[in-house]
Amino acid sequence: MTAMNELSRAGAAPWARRGSVFSQAGLARPVDWASPHDLDRLRASHARRRLGKPLVPTSVASPRLGDELFARLLSYGTPQEIDRGDVLFRPGDEDTDLIVVARGSVEVVRTATANVRAATVAVVDAGGFVGELNLLTGQNVYLLCRAREAGTIHRVSPVRLRQLMATDVELSDIVFKALIARRELLQRSTAALAVEIVGGARSAAALALRTYAGRQRLIHLWFDAGTPAGRAMMESSGLTEDDLPAVVMPGTTLKQATPGGLAEKLGLSYRRSSTKPVDVTIVGAGPAGLAAAVYGASEGLDTVLLDAVGTGGQAAASSRIENYFGFPFGLAGADLTGLAVLQALKFGAQLASPCEAVKLDTGRNGDLLRLHLQGGEVIDSKAVVIATGARYRALPLERWPDFEGAGIYYAATELEARGCMGSPVTVVGGANSAGQAALYLAGRGSTVSLVVRGPDIAAEMSAYLVDRLRAHPRVTVRCRSEVTRLDGGDFLEEVSITDRTTESTQAQQCSGLFCFIGAEPATSWLTGIATGDDGFIRTDVQLNDDDLGPAWATLRRRPLPFETNIPGVFAVGDVHSGSMKRVAAATGEGASAIASVHKAISTFV
Ligand SMILES: Cc1cc2nc3c(=O)[nH]c(=O)nc-3n(C[C@H](O)[C@H](O)[C@H](O)COP(=O)(O)OP(=O)(O)OC[C@H]3O[C@@H](n4cnc5c(N)ncnc54)[C@H](O)[C@@H]3O)c2cc1C
């Protein structure tokens, strides 16, 4: 029976009888988003997170659905009668439903942890719906939902929600924006205490965990173990220094936590419920992979996107991208890739991270390519897009590995800059990424030495950056110079810079060395894929007849645009030979490759 039929049988819609309550539907009665009591510790923390501008206005968290739209929303669900106290979902549940309240009332509760009492996050009356972004990301439930008053709910399953997103533009717009707005509100609320991360402010392991949580937009709260709030949190959770970094969640504490362990607990690792092969698996979720995922999923391909670290790639490490088409005022790389992640999810792509591809079988098994993941799982798919980008080069200096993440960074974003605020830093490199980082760090109050090996900073850097660097009072450009020594205890404290013109060396204080000296293609996990001398992957017209094996004779075609020497395997973005190493070029290649994926798949069947 459809929701409409149900309504006409019942006469007036039950929520309509509640008059204005229905018209205020959505998350109809959100209680205090931030409970002052629970947030006392958060406020006490000196290193609390700075939250960015919301992606959508928070007002859309509680949309007002008219009768006709609400009935349409109900029609995607399956009705269920509920009694007061019934639990509709609880922390740890997988694949929860969107809960639409037709009659009665339900509440969403953050359950108690060792440190904090339980708290009601929201109350939803008839006419509203319960759900946030984890409905699309696949993250396990971290809150509890139970009935406050008896009534009727309609459960919209993940599959039905995807159908809604794909077919009902008006409704999907409202629901999607509400899910995003709720995630933003929850991050600012007492719900953030459902996932607490504690660690050292300058610990590399804690930074990895926080970077992952930030890029995945996880609802969480960060505690610096060096602050009174952090110590109090550790004490109440029974944690010692040896346990750091740690994550405390309802019913679980992860000690010496890693992004992989956290993802596993939250249900964000790769898992597949269907036994059907995937149409296209995309390896690498930087701009190129994300663009491929958006276009693949939006064009109806069953799309899986994996990343060894987290979404965003190098672009997420860029504090400000000023040359991306359509953004004259520039934008943070993480904002751009964060929006692309939402877009890919909206179209139904499945994202998993951290999830590293360790091998690709290049011999097709029937119609399928087999990808092996760290941890032993395999994914069989009709096509594979390699978008693994490039990895940063390091300087061959003693103690370099000791200081990676503990004073040596390959990105200059808020997270890295905070540890060096106001202290002298060194930026190494002569290209745009180094110039941007130097300006960003100087803008955050650090005095910056920009160390360039070549004789002229203008050789590789855009003129607008060169002018700004030369004019900045806190930036010193040191050409024909190299960093030749690193010193410090657990953290980097000092660097020595050698001027190659005079061969004189000077040691100077340095709380952060930001290294931007280029990158190597992330292809070490691949065999049998044709590359250039520099290791970057060759495709289509870059391939010779000698590169093409017997499989091509059977196919009776040449490699399509972005197709490698292995039929059905594509390479896009920075990993691609001759690529421009720019965000716009990477996204263009990722999107364009999908046209070839469609054609290739059709030649295998
Ligand atoms: C600090 C900085 C500033 C920059 N500024 C600009 C700028 O202003 N303008 C501009 O146009 N460009 C800029 N760039 C360059 C731009 O970011 C890159 O060209 C772009 O990100 C390349 O995209 P990609 O998707 O090809 O690769 P990447 O962004 O490198 O992404 C590759 C992804 O693949 C993942 N991966 C690697 N191996 C595996 C594996 N085996 N399994 C699973 N996943 C894997 C990685 O974790 C990574 O997330 C900047 C780069 C940096 C570092």
Image (cartoon, rainbow, N blue to C red):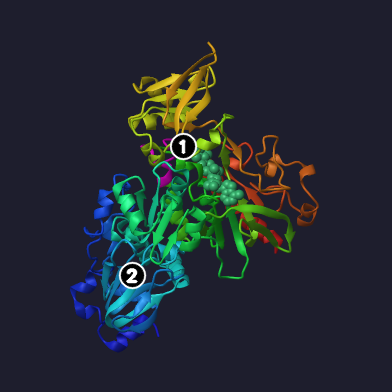
x, y percent for residue 273:
55, 70
x, y percent for residue 194:
35, 61
Total number of numbered discs in the rendering? 2
The residue wearing badge 1 is 490
Left or right of 280 in this view: 604? right
- The quadrant in which the C terminus is found is bottom right
Q: Answer yes or no: do the residues labelled 1 and 2 have beta carbons within 8 Å? A: no
Q: Amino acid at mark 2?
A: Val
- The magenta span reads 321-335
Q: Amino acid at mark 1?
A: Asp
Which mark is drawn over residue 130?
2
User: At 36% across and 54% down in the image, what residue appears?
Assistant: 234
Q: Which of the pair 349/449 is nearer the observer?
A: 449
Left or right of 388 in this view: 103? left
Q: Is residue 82 magenta?
A: no
Dot 1 lies on which element? loop
- The quadrant in which the N terminus is found is bottom left
Which mark is drawn over residue 431?
none
